[in-house]
Image (cartoon, grey):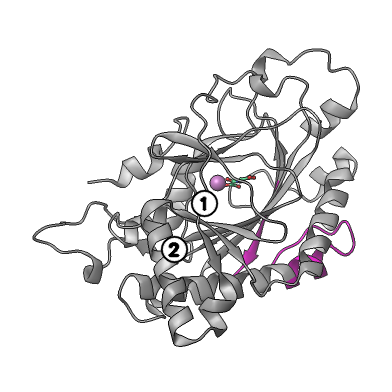
Amino acid sequence: MGIKGLVESGYLNSIPPEYVFPSNLNDLEVEEVPTVDFSQLTAGTPDERSKAIQVIGKACREWGFFMVINHSMPRRLMDEMLNVGERFFDLAEEEKQDHAGKELFDPIRCGTGFNNGLGNVFLWRDYLKVHVHPHFHAPHKPADFRETSEEYCKKARDVAEELLKGISKSLGQEENYIHKKMDVESGSQLLVMNLYPPCPRPELVMGMPPHSDHGILTLLMQNDVCGLQILHNGKWVPVNPPPYSFLVNTGDHMEILTNGRYESVVHQVVVNSNATRMTIATGHGPPLGAIISPAAELVDSENHPPKYQGMKYRDYIELQQTNQLEGKSCLDRVRI
Ligand code: OGA
Ligand code: NI
């Protein structure tokens, strides 16, 4: 039974002790995450475009996160994705497990707070993870999941590619630089749907513990319920993205490729007592077999020698997902 099932069973009088998470909720800070106007990046005047690139560069240096508005993903499709995701989580438990593999690299996996690879920390979250590129997969229920998610994931890749052009330019490189370096064409894309049901004692539990994302870039959208917090200058900053925007963050492999210029930033998810939160993330990475190390063009061997050693992307994910430590522990394993 997932957390959704647990909450809906009506028997939840107190929080099961396995779910009690050591508190992280001190020191909240209200600050505005930078916003990138996608239309200016892709269709603006040269002046608008260069300003958008500057905003991206500053956001990558100072935050590792930015919100993207006026992007090319249709609102209709974002609504449809949330809707089909909701109907997936509404399926009976056996139906959900029906098409779910057990191994880390199985193309479709779904799970809950207590099979999350984190040992004995239980999280207030149900999830579905689907490998959607270079080979597309989809659960066979609900019937329209395949068509909707295929269109969504393709368009999310288009958005990611445009953003990567901007990021490449912000590093002083030509626009296809990261695309080529990371072989994004045959790269991996993972679709993740997260469901965080309401919790009677939200301060005791955690939706997702502090972590950074593997890969190059993550695009996240949510229903209208907030919960994500970003670790920024030592304080947790709650994020409140405008409707139909994307929240974008750079991943560990961007940090590795740029030799630490663009750090992947730690974030976490808290839950609340009155509304179900749903998020849909697409994680964009290099091919699973690729070995990413700091790029020669971005390493100044006199002043900034390479800070990370290369590791096959697949091995990195395996290390991260079976890791019991918090935060950026996995990145620490490749740090020189
Ligand atoms: C993730 C993640 C945030 C959220 O899936 O890696 O950080 O708000 N999700 O669901
Ligand atoms: Ni994340």
Depicted 222 relative to depicted 73: above or below: above
Q: What residue appears at the point 59 percent right and 21 percent down from the top-left corner?
A: 21
Determine the residue positioned at 46% across, 61% down.
216
**Residue 12 vertical placement versus 281 (above, below):** above
Badge 1: residue crowd in 10 Å (few <14, some 14–19, many ≥20): many
The image shows residue 92, relative to residue 193, as above or below, that is above
Q: Nearer the viewer, residue 102 or 71?
A: 71
Q: Is residue 291 left or right of residue 241?
A: left
Q: Position of residue 181 (x, y in %)?
A: 37, 73
Residue corresponding to mark 2: 289
Where's residue 118, x and y in %?
55, 31
Q: Which residues are magenta?
A: 128-151
- Magenta highlight on residue 250: no
Who is closer to the viewer here, 95 or 68? Answer: 68
Label 2 Cα neighbours within 10 Å, binned few <14 / some 14-19 / many ≥20? few
Image-based side of 145 in relation to 225, left or right: right
Q: Nearer the viewer, mark 2 or mark 1?
A: 1
Residue type at numbered disc 1: Val
